[in-house]
Structure formats: structure tokens, C-alpha cells
Amino acid sequence: MLYDLFVAPFVEFEFMRRALVGSCALALSGPPLGLFLVLRRMSLTGDAVAHAILPGAAIGYLLSGLSLWAMTIGGLVAGLLVAIGSGVAARATILREDATLAAFYLVSLALGVTLVSSRGSNIDLLHVLFGSVLALDDATLVFLVGVASVTLAAFALLYRALVIETVDPSFLASVSRAGGLTQSLFLALVVLHLVAGFHALGTLLAVGMMMLPAASARLVSTNMTAMIGIAAALGLLASYAGLVLSFQSALPSGPLIILVAGLLYLLALVFGPAGGLVRLLKPRHHLEA
Amino acid sequence: MSAAISLRDLTLGYDRHPAVHHLDAEIESGTLVAICGPNGAGKSTLLKAIAGAIVPLSGSIVLPRAKPREIAYLPQSAEIDRTFPIDVFDVVAMGLFHTCGLFGGVSRSDRARVAAAIHAVGLDGFERRPISTLSGGQLQRMLFSRLLVQDASILLLDEPFTAIDSKTTADLLDLVARWHAEHRTVLVVSHDLDLVRAHFPQTILLAREPIARGKTEAVLTAENLAAARKMIEAFDRHAHACARPA
């Protein structure tokens, strides 16, 4: 009975195994990036970049149909253009980064929706927006896992610079010129990860996989290393549980994965020992020193 | 005595408006110098520029005997993100940057140096405390201990004693005196004139334009301080391009 519920779908159906591998790859590499977005108060940046990817993917789609590489390259170019363009505009003008990013991604999104609806059907738009984790082919799966691996390796190399740049940017500027490059590489990783994510989960939900486990982990622990581990574990749990739910209920899997991640987030919000509501609801007696 | 830092006709600023205007100064090796002046006088900007964090609009900063790595810079503590989940030991270990870089490992002897520096500022037992739990004084002690680990020949301290209680200030001044005794060059931005008179032999008085520099008692006169106050009120939104030759 339990076997039928939790294991059988993955044993019996190859598409379920592929979906599991793809979403687990994203669950391992996305949350660490999301954690730094949370800590750097850039939580909405992922969202903006994800919207910005749309016109690039759409142009790729218009040129060569549902081709992995065309849509990937298009998405990467659009995402990087918006990320770099808004960064340059923020440094060169009076507008702050959040304002320029909002402006750039809104234009990009409008362009994307226009392009998609000028040629494609609504079903295609749904594919780009919400992904198709149950229809991952070999090439897409290899790409997803490859991107996840590259992201994790690059993140490990960037880690020290990223921590110092976030805690004390003036100190980093005084000992090294790596600060600007660190920021750019970090944003590039976010873009790359979201482009990979939209094949499996769609542009909108790829952000959810990045941000929800990260925000939850921040509520559970005060230790950076633990947070990264917890975030990845929550992502994996959401991927697995979401797929099982989707299989048993015949509802779309991408949104269900994110809903499970959202449920875990709500639990962390209430019970998270490192800043959840539980501290307010059930205050413990203060210590002696 | 040779110059540790030469500032030659240095102009620093933001958006073309000068924050430091045509400053010439030689800071001799091994001296302990206070940089004074009203708010907006360009003190922090000057320190940032010497630390290499901003580029001069014109003029130059020459550090004849120091490679960039021999400079240790203490930013104003407000620039530190205190909500970040990092503990005291790891912040102090940032001072190892020149030995470990961005990718190198931290050896046992490096760890011992960090631990010794934490002990030297009296933060024993705080090694694994998250920085969000520190008081203002403890935070400043931690940043001084990072400076100890950096072991630089030139130290640049931006407002290190602001909002710090007298016990902590005294302890940190002892460290400054120790660096001075070790013949390091120490520049400290401060607007506490009594503290400067008591502890700093040399002073540069800045009010965007250089007002005076030299022995502290000769610089911090009522006359010079009045001139500094007057100068700082002269910001002009529609200023013309400066005609002095660069």
C-alpha cells in the first residue's frame, strides 16, 4: 500500500524517474543561490530575472520551435541583458538597482508575452510559463543536471568572496578588486540556473524552487552551512512529495512541487526556531546571562 | 623619515563635486595622524581612496614603500551588514585575506593567529557568537582584531571611536598606541577633538579644502576650526568646473 503510493510511480514509469532527477538537480543547486538572494535583500531579483528570460525563450521558440538549445540561448541572452543592463543603469544613473531592474524586466516581459501570442498558441505559452517536468527528454535532462553541477561548483568557488562582499563590501574593496566581478558572476549564475529551471518548472516556478527553500532555511537555522544543507534538503523533499502528489491526484506537477515547498515554508514561518512566529507565540523564560 | 603615503594635488569626489579638493600631503612612515574636520569634510572619502576603494577624480596617491596588501582599512561600522549569519571568528579570519586569498585554505597557524587576535581585544568566548548579537563596542573590538590579523604597515581607521563607551575606547586606543610603537603608519578619522588632542601627535584638518596639517596643537586652533566650519557651508549645486590646473 505504502509502496504503491510512494515508490511504485517511480519504479513503473520512466517519465516519473526523469522528473525526479530533473527536479532534484534543481533542488540541490537553486537554494544556495536563493539563500544569498535572501541575505542580500535581493529576493525579488530572481523573480524579475525569471520574467526577463521569457522574451529570449520566446524568440528562440519562434525561430526554431520547441528546441532546447534555441530557447536556452535566447533565455540566457535575455536574462543576462536585463541583469547587466539594469546593473549598469543603476550605477550610471540616479535610479537604484531595484527600480532599474523593475523597469527592465517589465519591458522584457511585455515583449515576451507579445512575441509568444503573436505566433504561438496558449498551450505553448503555458509550456514556457509552467514548464513540463513530466516530459523531460534526454537532452533536457543532461542539460539540467549539467547546469546544476556547474552552478554548485561555481558557487563553491565564489562562496568566500560572496560572503565578504555581503557582510562588508568596503573591506573587500580594500583588499581585492574581486567585488564587482563577484556580483556579476553571482547574477550570471542566477540567470543560468533560472534558464535551466524553466525547462522543468517554467520561468515562474523555477524561482519558487530557488527562493522558498532558502527563505525557509533562514527561519530554521542561524548557521550558514546548516542553512545551505537545510535549504537543499527542503528542496529535495518538495520535489519528491510534489511529484507523488501530482501522480496520485493527476494535477500538474510543477505547481504542486512549489506548493509543497510553500507548505514547508509556512511550517518554517510558524515553527522556525531561528526567527519563526513560535518565538512570539510561546516565549521562553529569559536566561540568567 | 620617508613618506609612507604621498597625496599629490588630490581631488576626490562623487558626481564631479569634490569631496576632497586639491590636497597635497606627505604622511611620514611610522606616524600617528588624526584626520579631523566637520561632517562632509571628505575625511571618510580620503580614507576610502587611500584604501583603494574609490578612484581619484584627479591627482594621485603614491604609496612608495607599500604594496596595496600592506594597507588595512577599517570601514565605519555602519557599513557592515550585521544581520548576516556569520560569527566573530569568521569575520576576524577575513583579516587573513592576504595569506589565504579567495580560494586558499586556512591553516592551523592561521587559526592560532585569529584566536590570538580575538584574545588581544578581550573577546574570549565570543568566537562562535553571530555578529548580530554583538553590542556596538564588541563589534568594534572584533573589527580591531581583524586589523591585528591583517598585520599591515599602514592602518586606516574610519571613526573607530564613535558611539563607543569609555572603557572600550581606552582599550582600543591602547592598541592604536601599540601600532604606533611598532612603527606602523596609522591614520584615524575622528571628530572628537579632545580625544585627538590627547592621543594623536599629528593632525590633518580637512574641510573639503585642506585647512592645516602638522603638530596637533598647532592645527586645532580656534582660528583654523572656524575656517573649517565656514568652508564646508560653501557647497554650490551649480558650481562651475574648477579652473585650477590639474
Image (cartoon, grey):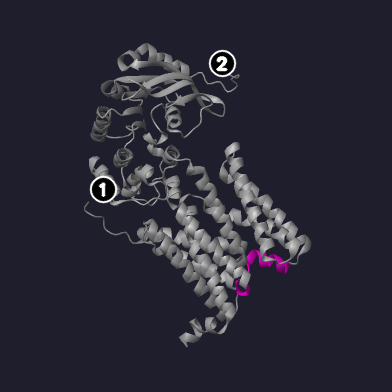
Q: Amino acid at mark 1?
A: Ala
Q: Would residue A37 be found to the left or right of residue B128 on screen?
A: right
Mark identifier at residue B209: none
Element on which disc 1 rests:
helix
Residue B72 seen in the current view: no
| Crowd around label 1: few <14 · some 14–19 · many ≥20 (10 Å) | few
Image coords of residue B165 (percent x, y): 27, 34
- The magenta-colored residue range is A122-137
Image coords of residue A256 (percent x, y): 56, 71
Residue A285 seen in the current view: yes
Image coords of residue A211 (percent x, y): 51, 59
User: Which residue is rendered at x = 44% and y = 67% of the image?
Assistant: A233
Taking the magenta stretch, the answer to whether it contains residue A109 is no
Mark identifier at residue B112: 1
Foreground pick, A127 / A174 = A174
Question: What is the spatial separation of the Cα atoms under label 1 and label 2, in whole angstroms?
Answer: 52 Å
Residue projecting furthest to the left: A288
Foreground pick, A239 / B59 = B59
Q: Amino acid at mark 2?
A: Pro
Q: Would residue B141 be found to the left or right of residue B40 on screen?
A: left
- Which of the chains bears the disc numbered 1? B
Q: Would residue A242 be found to the left or right of residue A227 on screen?
A: right
- Going from N to C along the chain, the mark reached first, 1 or 2, is 1
Image coords of residue B178 (percent x, y): 24, 31
Q: Is residue A63 above or below residue A104?
A: below
Residue B47 lies in quadrant: top left
